[in-house]
Image: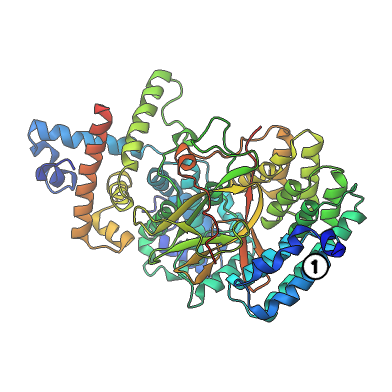
C-alpha cells in the first residue's frame, strides 16, 4: 500500500487549502483530483426510467413471491435474489460451449462447462446435486477460496438439460436464486434447470 | 428369461441404483413402475432420477412413489402429444423427455404441439427450451413459438434457438416492450449475438465430477 | 439536492399519497448520478444500469420507509450501493468489461477521444482492484461529491471509519495506478 502524506488527505477532505501544500504534495493531490474528474465524466446514458416505470406497472411475478416466501422460512440461508426479469446474472451463470482451441481440458463433443455460484456467507459447505450426478448431495463441492461468502465450482457436464439444487451444510436444500429457469420438483419446491450446450462445430 | 432379456438395461438394473438411496419399502413399487414404463417403451431414466432425487431430499416414501407415478404420467402424455403432432417416428426417449420437460416448465400443450409440428424430423429440445425461457419472462406462447419457428425457417441452427430467446429477453431488459423485443430480434434473424463463452480461467478451473462414492 | 421543480419531501408525499407517476421526477433528478456511481462501481455499463433500475424499483416499493425525505438522495445511494455490492458478490470474476461503456469525449476530436478513453480504461482497471467497500467510499466521496456526513447516512457507518476508508482507498488507487505504469 502506498503511503500518502496526511496533509494531502486533509486537503482532499477539505480540511486545509490545496494551495497550502508544498509542490510535491500538491502534485499528488492534483493527480487524485484528475482521476476523480475522469471518473466523474457521466457515461452517455440511456435512461432506465421507461424500464423502471414499466416494471412498476406490472403485477409482481408470482415465482418471485414464492421464492421469497421459501426464503422467509427459518431454514433458509442468506442469499441474494434478483427480479426474475433480469438475466444479467443468469447470463454469467450460463453454460458455455468451449471454443475448439480453448482450455487445457479435452472435452468431448457431447460435453460442456457449467459454472455454479451461490452467495452463502455463514455456510460451512456447499454442494450441488442434480440429475447429472444421481442427486448425490455430497459429491460435487463448491469452494469459497477467497472467503468472501461466495461459493463456486466449474464442472464438466454432459450436453443436455439438467435439474439441480444446492445443498448447504450437508442438509439444507436451496434453489439456485440466479438460475433464471425453474421447474417444480413435485416435492413442494423448485429445481433450477441448466442447459449444457455442445461444443461448437 | 426371454422376457427379462427384452427389457431395456435401465429397467434391469434399477434396484441396485435405488438400494441405500431411497427408503427400502418403496423400492418394489418404483421398480414395478419402471418395468411397466419400459415395457410400454417410455423412457425410464427420468423415473429413476425422480426416485433418487426424492431419496436425497429425504422426502417421505409415499411422496416419492407419487412423484415417480406423476412423472410417468407426464412422459406418457408427452408421447401422446408427439403422436398427435404427427412427429415422424421413431418417438425417441430424448424427444419424449424434451416434451415432458417443456410441459413441466409451463409451456401449454397446444404450443408444444405447434412447435413439434413446425419442426418435423428435427430435434425439439432446444426449440422448446427457448419457448419455455420466453414464457418464464411472460411472453405469450403464440408469439414465442412463432419467433422460434421463424428462426428455424430463416436458417438459425437448432442449437442456437436458446440464443434467440436470450436476445429477446435482453431487448426487454433494455427497455423494449415485449412486442418490440420480439420484432427487433426477428428483424435481425438469422443474425444473432454470439453465445457466451467461458473465460480462460473458467475453462482451466473446470473439473469433472468425481466418481460415485462407494456404498 | 433538487435543482428546479418541487423539493424531494413534496414529491415523496405525492407518491405516497397515490401519485405513482410522480416517481418519474425522482428518477429524472437522480438517475444520472446513480448511473455514474453504479457504472464506476461495477466497471460495466449494462450491469450499472441493471443495478440502478433494480435499486429504483426497490426504492419505490419501500418509499414509506425513507424516514427523512429531505435526505432522499443519500437514501437512494444507499439502495443502489447495496445492489452493486450484491452484484459484485455474485459475479464470478472481477474482469472489467469496458467495451460496453460508451465513449465519453467529444467525438469531433478523435485523438483526444482515444487518449481519454485509454486513460479511463486505466483508471477503471485500477479502481476495480479495490475491495468493494473502499471502491464505494472513493466513488461516493470524490466522484459523487458526498460529504462525510452524507456518506454516513448512505452507508450507516460512522464518520471516522469512513474517513479512514477513503484515505486507504486513495492510497490503494495510487498504488494500483503506479503498478499499471510500471507494467
- Label 1 crowd bin: few (<14), some (14–19), many (20+), radius 10 Å: many
Q: Where's the N terminus of chain A, which quadrant?
A: top left
Secondary element at image label 1 = helix
Q: Nearer the viewer, residue A36 or C48?
A: C48
* Left or right of residue C166: residue A56: right
Which residue occupies 61% across, 61% down?
A: A134
- Residue A39: tell me if it is visible: yes
B60 in relation to C54, above or below: below
Residue where numbered disc 1 is placed: B35
Q: Nearer the viewer, residue B59 or B7?
A: B7
Residue at far front of view: B1
Which residue occupies 89% across, 49% down?
A: B87
Residue A42 x %, y %: 41, 39
Residue B193 in which image quadrant: top right
A192 in relation to A115, above or below: below
* Left or right of residue C102: residue A179: right
- Residue B106: tell me if it is visible: no
Residue C145 x %, y %: 29, 48
* Left or right of residue C41: residue C56: right
Q: Callout 1: residue from which chain?
A: B
Residue A170 x %, y %: 47, 69
Which residue occupies 50% across, 56% down?
A: C54
Q: How many marks?
A: 1
Residue B203 x %, y %: 49, 40
Q: Nearer the viewer, residue C136 or C2?
A: C136
* Left or right of residue A7: residue B54: right
Amino acid at each position: 500500500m502506498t503511503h500518502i502524506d496526511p496533509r494531502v488527505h486533509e486537503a482532499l477532505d477539505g480540511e486545509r487549502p490545496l494551495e497550502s501544500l508544498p509542490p510535491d504534495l500538491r502534485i499528488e493531490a492534483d493527480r487524485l483530483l484528475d482521476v476523480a474528474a475522469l471518473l466523474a465524466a457521466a457515461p452517455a446514458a440511456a435512461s432506465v426510467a421507461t424500464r423502471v416505470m414499466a416494471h412498476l406497472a406490472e403485477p409482481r411475478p408470482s415465482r418471485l413471491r414464492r421464492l421469497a416466501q421459501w426464503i422467509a422460512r427459518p431454514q433458509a440461508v442468506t442469499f441474494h435474489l434478483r427480479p426474475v426479469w433480469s438475466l444479467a446474472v443468469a447470463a454469467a451463470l450460463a453454460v458455455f460451449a468451449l471454443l475448439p482451441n480453448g482450455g487445457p481440458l479435452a472435452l468431448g463433443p457431447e460435453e460442456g462447462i457449467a459454472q455454479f455460484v451461490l452467495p452463502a456467507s455463514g455456510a460451512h459447505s456447499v454442494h450441488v446435486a442434480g440429475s447429472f450426478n444421481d442427486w448425490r448431495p455430497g459429491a460435487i463441492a463448491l469452494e469459497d477460496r477467497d472467503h468472501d461468502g461466495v461459493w463456486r465450482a466449474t464442472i464438466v457436464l454432459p450436453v443436455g438439460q439438467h435439474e439441480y439444487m444446492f445443498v448447504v451444510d450437508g442438509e439444507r436444500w436451496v434453489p439456485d436464486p440466479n438460475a433464471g429457469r425453474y421447474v417444480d420438483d413435485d416435492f413442494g419446491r423448485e429445481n433450477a434447470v441448466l442447459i449444457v450446450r455442445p461444443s461448437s462445430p | 428369461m426371454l422376457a427379462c432379456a427384452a427389457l431395456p438395461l435401465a429397467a434391469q438394473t434399477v434396484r441396485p441404483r435405488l438400494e441405500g438411496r431411497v427408503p427400502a419399502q418403496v423400492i418394489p413399487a418404483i421398480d414395478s413402475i419402471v418395468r411397466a414404463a419400459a415395457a410400454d417403451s417410455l423412457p425410464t431414466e427420468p423415473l429413476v432420477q425422480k426416485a433418487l432425487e426424492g431419496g436425497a431430499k429425504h422426502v417421505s416414501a409415499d411422496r416419492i412413489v407419487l412423484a415417480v407415478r406423476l412423472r410417468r404420467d407426464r412422459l406418457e402424455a408427452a408421447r401422446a402429444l408427439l403422436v398427435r403432432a404427427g412427429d415422424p417416428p421413431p418417438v425417441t426417449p430424448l424427444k419424449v423427455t424434451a416434451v415432458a420437460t417443456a410441459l413441466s416448465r409451463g409451456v401449454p400443450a397446444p404450443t408444444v404441439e405447434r412447435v413439434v409440428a413446425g419442426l418435423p424430423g428435427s430435434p425439439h429440445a432446444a426449440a422448446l427450451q427457448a419457448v419455455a425461457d420466453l414464457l418464464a419472462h411472460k411472453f405469450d406462447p403464440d408469439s414465442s413459438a412463432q419467433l422460434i419457428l421463424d428462426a428455424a425457417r430463416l436458417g438459425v441452427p437448432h442449437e442456437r434457438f436458446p440464443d434467440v430467446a436470450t436476445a429477446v429477453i435482453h431487448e426487454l431488459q433494455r427497455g423494449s416492450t415485449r412486442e418490440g423485443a420480439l420484432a427487433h430480434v426477428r428483424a435481425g434473424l438469422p443474425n444473432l449475438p454470439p453465445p457466451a463463452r467461458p473465460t480462460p480461467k473458467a475453462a482451466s478451473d473446470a473439473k469433472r465430477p468425481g466418481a460415485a462414492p462407494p456404498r | 439536492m433538487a435543482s428546479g421543480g418541487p423539493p424531494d419531501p413534496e414529491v415523496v408525499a405525492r407518491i405516497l399519497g397515490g401519485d405513482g407517476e410522480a416517481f418519474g421526477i425522482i428518477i429524472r433528478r437522480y438517475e444520472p448520478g446513480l448511473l455514474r456511481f453504479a457504472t464506476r462501481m461495477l466497471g460495466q455499463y449494462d450491469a450499472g444500469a441493471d443495478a440502478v433500475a433494480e435499486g429504483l424499483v426497490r426504492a419505490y416499493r419501500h418509499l414509506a420507509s425513507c424516514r427523512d425525505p429531505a435526505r432522499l438522495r443519500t437514501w437512494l445511494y444507499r439502495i443502489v450501493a447495496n445492489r452493486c455490492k450484491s452484484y459484485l458478490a455474485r459475479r464470478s470474476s472481477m474482469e472489467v468489461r469496458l467495451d460496453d461503456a460508451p465513449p465519453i469525449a467529444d467525438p469531433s476530436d478523435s485523438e483526444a477521444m482515444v487518449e481519454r478513453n485509454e486513460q479511463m480504461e486505466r483508471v477503471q482497471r485500477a479502481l476495480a482492484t479495490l475491495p468493494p467497500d473502499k471502491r464505494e467510499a472513493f466513488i461516493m466521496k470524490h466522484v459523487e461529491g458526498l460529504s462525510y456526513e452524507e456518506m454516513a447516512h448512505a452507508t450507516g457507518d460512522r464518520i471516522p471509519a469512513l474517513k479512514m476508508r477513503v484515505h486507504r482507498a486513495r492510497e490503494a488507487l495510487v498504488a494500483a495506478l503506479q503498478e499499471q505504469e510500471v507494467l
